[in-house]
Image: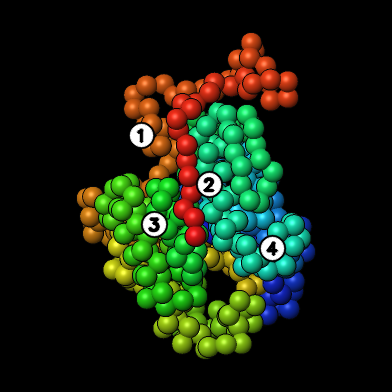
Amino acid sequence: MQFGIFSVSDITRDPVSGYTPSEAERIDAIVKIAQKTEEVGLDVFAIGEHHNPPFTSSSPTTLLSHIAATTKRLIVSTSTTLITTNDPVRIAEEYAMLQHLARGRVDLMMGRGNTAPVYPWFGQDIRQSLPLALENYGLLHRLWREDVVDWEGAFRTPLQGFTSIPRPLDDVPPFVWHGSIRTPEIAEQAAFYGDGFFANNIFWPKEHFQRLIGLYRQRYAHYGHGSEIQAIVGLGGQAFMARRSQDAVEQFRPYFNEAPVYGHGPSLEDFMAATPLSVGSPQEVIDKTLTFREHFGDYQRQLFLMDHAGLPLNTVLDQLEILGGEVVPALRKEMAARRDPEAPPAPTHESLVRAKYGSDEPRQPKPNPNRGDNVTGGSPYQDTDPTVRTTYPRL
């Protein structure tokens, strides 16, 4: 199991102090939170991609490359990379570069996003968001696995003899999760490619995500990637802790009540009863998180949202101390004891290299200086097997 933090990078007024941080303060805070995530023994830090206020993370690769440079073992990831409004060629290039700089400590989560105005800002039509997601990822998948790509689709100009550079580190692409709140076609897409499926698991009752995860597991087995138990699942969650549960509820209530994403709706108590939100003692958070396995089966990654709704940096860092010092060690022990032996571990760059190459040295792609280039002739990179062609599930 991997445990970590995911952030949406919101800049929200603190309802207790009345203070709203600047963009500079919030960006600095996110870096400190990521560094603290490693310090307390967690495995992953993930950041969302947004292009609208009040969010700051418009350039995840820039932010994550800095975080990777200031940490030693932390896996840096995205909690959404917009597969619809980004050019898949740029995604291929930017995340392969990040993979090299992070020495393999990187993966990413594909998603369509939930901000409608972003589509026209980047020249796309939200009514085409699902076909865009399927086609763009089909191209990205090929760009990372074939040295030379000929491609034609509906949403971008064709590619002829195109090589995406740099090639993935060790010729093994970053692992991809497909994130979805409500779309079965995305669960189908994740299963088709044998990728991971990440269920946000924040705002909705467990029954909603049970259906999506159940579909993904069934289709993962259908496409021949392994059994349903062997499918790769990630979950989100939210937590706020204090030594006494009453203190946690009292401290978190003003932030909950004013939070842009769920404030002014159900009461805190009702929301906790209906969703995965955990507000209480460390043991209560442990107990509730353990129910996720009962609902969804053995899974590979658990990320917590903890830095939202205007919570000040020092409070978030204190929460991470509790999470890393008490909650996650207990969860690791309990989940390992209950785990089905058939359930695989979370993918890492090292495990993916072993799966592809075994004990052999991985291929290190490099251009052949005697073979032209993408402008004047054929690609100087080694061609992959011309019979290999990756398709994508169509609507």
Please tell me which of labels 4 and 1 falls first in the chain: 4
- Residue reaching furthest to the top: 370
The percent coordinates of residue 1 (x first, y second) are: 36, 52
Pointers 4 and 1 in contact (CB under 8 A)?
A: no
User: In the figure, is residue 395 to the left or right of 287?
Assistant: right
Amino acid type, label 3: Val
Residue marked by disc 4? 125
Label 4 – label 2 distance at C-alpha: 19 Å
Residue 319 visible, this angle: no
In the foreground, 183 or 63: 183
Please tell me which of labels 4 and 2 falls first in the chain: 4
Amino acid type, label 1: Ala
Residue marked by disc 3? 233
Residue 125 visible, this angle: yes
Specify the quadrant of the image occupied by residue 27: bottom right
Amino acid type, label 4: Asp
Name the mark on residue 138: 2
Identity of the residue drawn at 68% across and 20% down: 377
274 to 389, vertically: above or below:
below
Please tell me which of labels 4 and 3 falls first in the chain: 4
Name the mark on residue 376: none
